[in-house]
Image (cartoon, grey):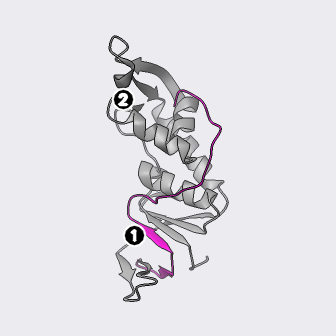
Amino acid sequence: MNTQYDVIVVGGGHAGSEAALIAARMGCATLLVTARRDALARMPCNPSIGGLAKSHLVYELDALGGEMGRNADATALQAKTLNLSRGPAVHATRAQCAKKEYTLRMQRVVASTPNLTVLEDAALEILTDPSPSHPTAGVENPDTGYGNPDTVSQLHAICRGIRTEHHGSF
């Protein structure tokens, strides 16, 4: 396994999976470190995407080339626009998704994405280097270290320059 990556993402939940996918799609050699591969992007007990407070985040991920909106469209059991009796400024989309299918589909997308390696392991520490030009040196795990990333992300990576043509519910 390669031990040199441009981006290392720690955590394979929704944010970590999206960050790793976007970085890999930008051409960065990306490592996603997660405790359990089978828990990547696992849906909670209420398997909804969007809603009043979060639908704008799904739209922003979609604009960056993220997968959450596509995945929600593909696995939606029901999609609804909320607050239709109010003005358009407070309209929001919420999709109830098939819990298991959402997770399995996202795992297939992650597994098939070029430039993206998934490591099932613990991230014990984010290693730093005092050099101002390269302040992050890598991630330490129980077996070996993975180093020299341009970015280590605990939750997400900020990516720019990706355009998408996806136009579903999200």
- Mark 1 is surrounded, within 10 Å at the Cα level, by few (under 14), some (14 to 19) or many (20 or more) other residues, namely some
Q: Quadrant of the N terminus?
A: bottom right
Relative height, residue 81 to residue 128 (above, below): above
User: Which residue type does callout 1 highlight?
Assistant: Ala
- Where residue 67 sits in the image (x, y, percent)? 55, 44
The residue that mark 1 highlights is 122
Which residue is painted at 52% across and 69% down in the image?
Answer: 7
Name the kind of residue labelled 2 in the image.
Gly
Q: Earlier in the sequence, mark 1 or mark 2?
A: 2
Q: Residue at x 56, y 55 (%)?
A: 22
| Position in image of residue 133 (x %, y %) | 46, 84
Residue 127 visible? yes
> Closer to the camera, 83 or 140?
83
Residue topped by disc 2: 51
The magenta segment: 141-170
Say if 76 sits above or below 138 in the image: above
What residue occupies the far bottom of the structure in this picture? Answer: 130
